[in-house]
Image: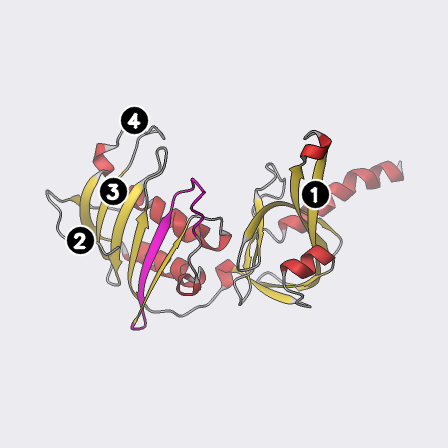
């Protein structure tokens, strides 16, 4: 009976240990681990990135070892046998805000350029005092019902936007109430939220990552901060940017604005 009880309890203990690490964790070199789905409902629902690329993976924890697995099938097995490449990291030290990991297998050491240990900070705890004066966001059209948004937001919260949104994810049913040219001023609490997201997503450090063969929607950010200008464009997976992307994609739905009868200005591209 004791053996059966232990067998039942171990999976729940492992799940609980993994749940404690749920979130986005970022290093000073913009490496990241993204533990979003502790049940691994999809094979690529979590992520691991080395600053140059990010892989969609499953993740598990056994003791102090975190294993990030890229699962796939090969032609050699007639696409019947599942293969897995594992990036294994040992937890050296962890808290609610920081985790120190050490690559322990060959693939992990190669993925993280033979670093002996990496310090990750939970995204919500990051302090990055960048003074944004203006943020411009563009989402390009896609083959479907992706929202097309061009918006410029100033430090005082005033904004101007041109957008094209669709109803119920249908590319044939345009939402006329959210399509056109708009202007307004963001609520101070929402503006504070935007600035925090922009700072802890390290927009000013990001580099262009555009795969021309990908059908993913292209996002462009143009930033004015501390007397500098930065433009970055991407359409590849990057968990660090998820929260800022979500903010802008949902911006027309959570903001009070008035429709302009005609274009008032040209948004920088």
Q: Secondary structure at mark 2?
A: loop
Q: Secondary structure at mark 3?
A: strand
Residue 251 in percent (x, y) is at: 31, 46
Spatial separation of the CA atoms under disc 3 and disc 2: 13 Å
First in sequence: mark 1 vs mark 4: 1
Q: Which residue is nearer to you in this view: 217 or 188?
A: 217
First in sequence: mark 3 vs mark 2: 3
Query: Residue under circle 3?
Result: 163
For image coordinates 49% across by 52% down, the residue present is: 238
Q: Which residue is nearer to you in this view: 143 or 125?
A: 143
Residue 112 in percent (x, y) is at: 63, 61
Query: Residue under circle 2?
Result: 266
Q: Are marks 4 and 2 in contact (CB under 8 Å)?
A: no
Spatial separation of the CA atoms under disc 3 and disc 4: 16 Å
Q: Characterize the local packing of mark 3: few (<14), some (14-19) or many (20 or more) Cα atoms within 10 angstroms.
A: some
Region of the chain picked out in magenta, as a range: 210-227
Q: Is residue 122 above or below residue 67?
A: below
Which quadrant would the C terminus be assigned to in this image? bottom left
Magenta stretch: dominant SS?
Answer: loop
Q: Characterize the local packing of mark 1: few (<14), some (14-19) or many (20 or more) Cα atoms within 10 angstroms.
A: few
Which tag is nearer the camera, tag 1 or tag 3? 1
Q: Is residue 183 above or below residue 215?
A: below
Q: Secondary structure at mark 1?
A: strand
First in sequence: mark 4 vs mark 2: 4
Residue 19 in percent (x, y) is at: 63, 48
Q: Quadrant of residue 216?
A: top left
Q: Are marks 3 and 2 in contact (CB under 8 Å)?
A: no
């Amino acid at each position: 009976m004791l053996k059966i009880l232990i067998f039942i309890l171990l999976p729940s203990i492992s799940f609980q240990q993994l749940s404690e690490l749920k979130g986005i964790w970022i290093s000073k070199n913009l490496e990241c681990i993204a533990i979003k789905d502790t049940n691994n409902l999809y094979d690529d629902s979590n992520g691991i990135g080395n600053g140059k690329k990010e892989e969609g993976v499953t993740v598990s924890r056994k003791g102090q070892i975190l294993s990030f697995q890229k699962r796939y099938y090969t032609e050699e097995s007639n696409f019947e046998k599942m293969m897995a490449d594992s990036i294994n990291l040992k937890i050296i030290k962890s808290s609610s805000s920081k985790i120190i990991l050490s690559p322990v297998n060959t693939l992990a050491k190669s993925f993280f350029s033979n670093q002996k240990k990496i310090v990750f900070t939970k995204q919500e705890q990051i302090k990055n005092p960048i003074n944004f004066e203006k943020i411009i966001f563009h989402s390009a059209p896609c083959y479907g019902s992706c929202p097309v948004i061009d918006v410029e937001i100033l430090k005082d919260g005033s904004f101007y936007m041109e957008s094209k949104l669709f109803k119920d994810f249908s590319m044939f049913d345009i939402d006329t109430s959210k399509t056109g040219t708009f202007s307004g001023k963001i609520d101070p609490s929402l503006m504070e939220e935007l600035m925090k997201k922009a700072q802890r997503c390290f927009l000013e450090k990001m580099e262009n990552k555009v795969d021309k063969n990908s059908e993913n929607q292209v996002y462009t950010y143009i930033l004015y901060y501390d007397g500098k200008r930065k433009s970055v464009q991407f359409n590849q997976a990057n968990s660090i940017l998820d929260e800022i992307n979500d903010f802008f994609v949902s911006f027309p739905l959570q903001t009070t604005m008035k429709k302009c009868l005609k274009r008032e200005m040209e948004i920088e591209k």
